Image: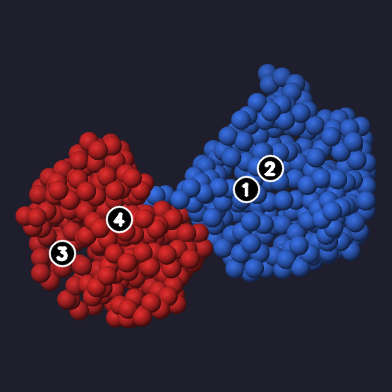
Chain colours: A red, B blue
Amino acid sequence: MFIIGELINGMYKNIGDAIKAKDKAVIQKCALEQLEAGASALDINCGPASRKPVEDIQWLVEIVQEVTDKPLALDSSKPQVIESGLKVIKNKSIINSVTADEEKLSVIVPLAIKYNSSLIGLTMSAKGIPQNKDQRLELAAMIVSFCCDQGFPVENLYLDPIVLPVNVAQSQIREILESIREFKIISEPSPKTVVGLSNVSQGTCTRSLINRTFLAMAVACGLDAAILDPKDKELMDALIAAEVILNKQIYCDSYLDAYRKK
Amino acid sequence: MAIEAGSVSVVSVGATKTEGGTRAHKIEIGKKPQVAFEVWDTAPLDWPEEFDKVFAGSLKDPFSWAEKCVNEYKAKILCVKLQGAHPDFENKPPEACAKFISQLLKKVDVPLIISGCGDDAKDNLVLPLCCEAAKNERCLIGSAVQDNYKTLVAAVLADEHNIIAESPIDINIAKQLNILISDMGLPLERIVINPTIGSLGYGLEYAYSIMERARLAALAGDRTIASPFICFVGQETWRAKEARISSEEFPGWGSETERGLAWEFVTAVALLQAGADMLVMRHPKAIEMINKNMGTLR
């Protein structure tokens, strides 16, 4: 499983304050803690309060690169913020994200090609969030075919079915899980799949339990990557157990330690 | 991006003068596959007569046996089995075993693999002394098993050797043992896995499938099972009926010499395909054949 740590996000107060005060120690500590806990990559998001996101994202990328060479996911809905981050990135990069709208794709996909970046494509459009699996597949196919036409390698594309909170859209969750499985058969080679995990538990009690239960189910559907909080140990334990059960990791009595030693 | 490619770790055996030892060269297990000649600290009782002929009677004197392997058959590394220490064999005291190792290190200058007698309690007395006797020579010492690894790991750590981790044709135990050993502070990069093999006709395919699965996991990035493999081909082959029984008893089977050689060679070839990195073998002719075969591998 490719794990993208979600904690460097200006929406969290400690990170928002650190961005404002240009306190790099707080950000770098957050980066290292997530990697230590098992993240394969780190999401970088200036947050809604940032007044100068074009500058802030460059600062974040540069200081995180001082402590790791792992991939960074540049998280913004604004193309100019993403490009600003791409200009200073030396690590591998992931653009997070683009929606299934032609005018957005025609800006972001060329950027991904130019900077040799991976890309997260959200199966939603200006018309809104899809209400069932078929609508998700339609949008996914639109993104895949756009990428193919532009010459962007589909194996570097991560499709996100848009996870909705279970307390708001309970009937959608099964559709989302089935979409993950079916996204893989859109093309050959297959696109990859990713979820922004914590959405599923937004506004619920016992969030961690809902997160890890959904994650295990999504892994069983073939999920390739997730944006999550790697410092949630029980979540990571559930993920490791799911991979063992699916024979993606070789079992041994210390399978939790073994996974972390890999 | 999701799959991180892995590689098999390389375990360096034998310390040269510049590294503080006295070996003529070092052997890197985990790069190209290689063969170690098996020698014993005592005369084997149940090896086929063929070996007496090949080694011209030197089996009775372990030092001249070892020297013959190195000087005549150009062995690059020896695997010394301390069979004489076994309580049911000669029950040699630990001090005598350690002395034997010290003397052997003076007689030959190739790297050594040192293998205990297989009796856990005795090996726990013998192997630490042998580790000490071979200090600075960076040997490969075995075997640690799931129920008996702590004493050997401590000795190997103290005297800076490498270790053989042995599991009974069981990938889950192989992985677990690697974790247990590395938890004691011995890096994963100093472990060689003995997956336990059977010879042709005696479970070879079970060993093959375990090795293949471990290697695929290693190449997909699982460091905990990415150790190179050592396979005791000679020991398993030469106890198979097909390798030993005389042509007088089974005339239809043809000459036992050719049969035994073929059995050892074919077992070794199959294990090479499964990813074996170090083959411990007995018959110089079979070793010559396998070396020739390995020369054709890319």
Disc 3/disc 4 C-alpha distance (Å): 28 Å
Residue wearing tag 3:
A164
Does residue B139 appear anywhere in the picture? yes
> Of tags 3 and 1, which is closer to the observer?
3
Residue wearing tag 1:
B228
Which amino acid type is shown beneath numbered disc 4? Glu
Q: Is there one chain holding both mark 2 and mark 1?
A: yes
Seen in the picture, residue B286 relative to B223 is either above or below; the reply is above
Residue wearing tag 2:
B278
Secondary structure under tag 4 reads helix
Q: Are marks 2 and 1 in contact (CB under 8 Å)?
A: yes
Pick whichever, B79 or A18, lies toward us: A18
Pick whichever, A255 or A157, lies toward us: A157
Pick whichever, B138 or B267, lies toward us: B138
Secondary structure under tag 3 reads loop
Give the number of the disc on residue A83. Answer: 4
Q: Is there one chain holding both mark 3 and mark 1?
A: no
Which amino acid type is shown beneath numbered disc 2? Met
